[in-house]
Image (tube, grey):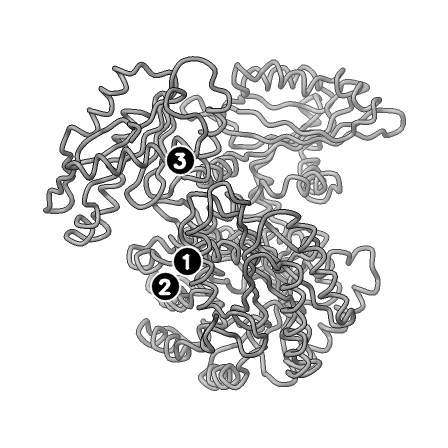
Amino acid sequence: MLRNEEIDQLTGLPNLYAFRKNAQKLMDDRNKKEKEFVIIYFDVQNFKNYNARYGFEAGDRFLQNMAKHIEKIFPELMVSRFSDDHFVALAYYNSIEARIDDLGRRIHSYNPDAGIELHAGIYEIDSEDTDISIACDRARIACNSIKKNYDHIFRYYDNELGTQLDLAHYIIHNISEAVLKGYIQVYYQPVVRVITGRVCGFEALARWVDPVHGFLMPGVFIPILEDAHLIYKLDAYVVRQVCEDIRDFMDQGLKPHPVSINLSRTDFHQRDMYHVVNDAVHQCNIPKSLIHIEVTESALDDSQDVLRGTIDKFRRGGYQVWMDDFGSGYSSLNLLKDYEFDVLKFDMKFLQNFGSNPRETAIWENVINMAEEIGIQTLAEGVETLEAWDFLKRVGCEKAQGYFFGRPMTKLECIDYLDEDRNKYKETPAQRAEEADDEALGLGRSVIELKKDAPEEEEEEDRTGFEDDELFMSESPVYMTLAARGFVSLLEYNSYSQFQKHSFFIVANLSKDKLLRVHLSSKRKILDKSYHKSESYQAMIDEIVKKSVIVDEQSIANDFFSKDRLILAYHSGITFDDFEFHRIVDIKMAPRWTHTIYQIMEDNGDIIAYFLSFDIDEYKRSKDLVRQMAERDSLTGLYNRHTAVPLIRNRLYRHQNGKSALIMADIDDFKVINDKYGSFAGDEVLRRISARLDDIFGRDGIVCHIDQDEFLIFVENIEIGNLKKRVSELCDNTFEVAYHRDRIQFTVSAGYVIHPDQGRGYHDLYRKADTALCKAKTEGKGMGLMYEEQ
């Protein structure tokens, strides 16, 4: 029987405390042959709005009915209400998805007009799980991962979420170190005036360049820090760094531009952000007019008194305050009535159909006009195309930012960017007004001139075609379409104009085998000649492939660019295709990944091909890093458990001949090392022993860091004598790690089991290897023992 303190008073269900106690007992007492257990974590989307719309009494009745439905559909083990609209069930696995769908329909039918939806996270408990709290956390993580996804109402906890959880723990425990050691870097994205394209400011954006995980994007670490209420550490650091950078600009005699800084909604509840900003400004002795504060629209939904007071304090203190993400919520116009802002910032993703939807154009024209009438400037972010820029000019938006104008960049890159911007605007004021639009396109890029073969006296006339080719490449719809198709791979470029400098663009008449236009990157040092209009397309391609594609890929590259193949593909209905290869930029440099995409169309009976080729080496390397992060333990570099266990199971399933071994190992008295020398020293010990394990077993085995100081190794096609020798090499030695002035000595114990002689299934082998390890540690540590039947 449950005591009163263990019962949720609203629903009558066991509460969080009771569930953890009793579910833990059920899990501990379960029979290995019993049906599989699962934890299901339920969350109701938009329940806060339901309370606001219908009242708290109606909300309570809803929760009571939901509790009855969950108990009815999952009656077998235990159901609990954890908090608010969060319920948890411990159930058997059978028909789990159908039962969740049934519950979702019942919840939705209770009030179809309320806009509430059920989401559920599922965690399958296996024989190795011992902690019900961890199981609940994993189910909750699975549920939270689909919060904004209305296409699916449930998700299983899987390897991807496990990797995300490991990364989240790492971020939470390392944010202070990242700030102190400068792993957090401030990048700046330029803001331009729409009418001229001239830089008028920057937005400060945080980037985490981590020694373990590499480049972490803000979309990864910022939500984690906000949920952990640690975001103030990041934002306070960014404020200080921005002020110091501006001071440095001024000390170098450079003209500083205003910088906008994003503040999180949680900052206002944990710190007096006005004093954080104001103190940094005073210490660096910079004008307040150079610092703008950005607050997201969603941050203004709660605790309005706190926010309104702080925003008013900023504006009275001489700082501009901007509303970020305007239009993303439901109360934008009310917020304009209740708060005073200097700038409204909206994302171009809300204007995706401006070219084809007159209603959308009318809406934003009126929003911009309204803002102008009440004295608020407008800024569009996410501008990526010339078409979007032209639209903003038409509707009267004042400022813009996005990859079309420049990507986020370091302080030193900003100086180069501003130098380039100043060099583009050295004309007289009259010329500047007349040519502002063309200048903003960044047309001063290096282009290899195309000209027809002609007598010398006609050379001057041919040179006038140079600017025409530039304009063609900047304004060609085909060129823009091809660039947009590969835009996900272009993010390493500072700006669209820089992308044009490094791109390789060809227009060819395939039917007549003639070049129409060519724009070759000036960075291609391996090429030493110009190509002319009306030359043979096929001859040019043959030469370029021979000189700039690595030998192993020349055959497939020749086939991809082949005039005859392209014509055949077009007649077969294939008008788009792409290809990735390694190109040689310089004989002194390693080949770089290059992406090529083409479009073919017919013009007056001739088949015309448009090719766009650009560098994606950094993009490829970042993808490889992400894949490696998902497979590897962040501390040791070994396989993590989520990757290794399926690999081991697969090897066991496919294993036909010979013997294999499963080995469990751990560091003796590792807790003593952590307590005596500190956790950083413990981490160094783990890294060193991991490298040793990889040396001994990695060449023909799978080495995995399970958790803390525990390791799992699987080795195939073993010879028993050799295996014992390798285990002895690990366990019969004392290892020493130098850490600062300390020399840390330790031993390793191991237990192993032979497959198929002593077991076949993974769980059976794991249990027996663990038993052998426990025996090794009991009998004196620093030992490696093979499993023996008791």
Q: Could you tell me which residue is drawn at 55 percent across and 83 percent down?
A: 304
Residue identified by numbered label 3: 639
Q: Amino acid at mark 3?
A: Tyr
State left or right for residue 540 relative to residue 607. Answer: left
Q: Position of residue 409 (x, y in %)?
A: 47, 52
Residue identified by numbered label 2: 241
Residue 300's disc number: none
Q: Residues within 10 Å of mark 1 (few under 14, many from 20)?
A: many
Q: Amino acid at mark 1?
A: Val
Q: Nearer the viewer, residue 344 or 398?
A: 344
Instruction: Find numbered disc 3 in the image and state the secondary structure of the residue it sits on.
Output: strand
Q: Gap in Å between the C-alphas at discs 2 and 1?
A: 7 Å
Is 58 rendered above or below residue 137? Answer: below
Q: Position of residue 166 (x, y in %)?
A: 42, 49
State left or right for residue 112 relative to residue 225. Answer: right
Q: Earlier in the sequence, mark 1 or mark 3?
A: 1
Q: Are marks 2 and 1 in contact (CB under 8 Å)?
A: yes
Residue identified by numbered label 1: 186
Q: Nearer the viewer, residue 184 or 424?
A: 184
Q: Position of residue 596 (x, y in %)?
A: 63, 30
State left or right for residue 167 relative to residue 677. Answer: right
- Residue at the extreme right of the image, as rendered: 604
Q: Could you tell me which residue is drawn at 72 percent across and 41 percent down?
A: 481
Q: Nearer the viewer, residue 717 or 284?
A: 717
Is 284 rendered above or below residue 548? Answer: below
| Total labels drawn | 3
Q: Could you tell me which residue is drawn at 83 percent across and 65 percent down?
A: 359
State left or right for residue 646 relative to residue 119. Answer: left
Q: Earlier in the sequence, mark 3 or mark 2?
A: 2
Q: Gap in Å between the C-alphas at discs 3 and 2?
A: 37 Å
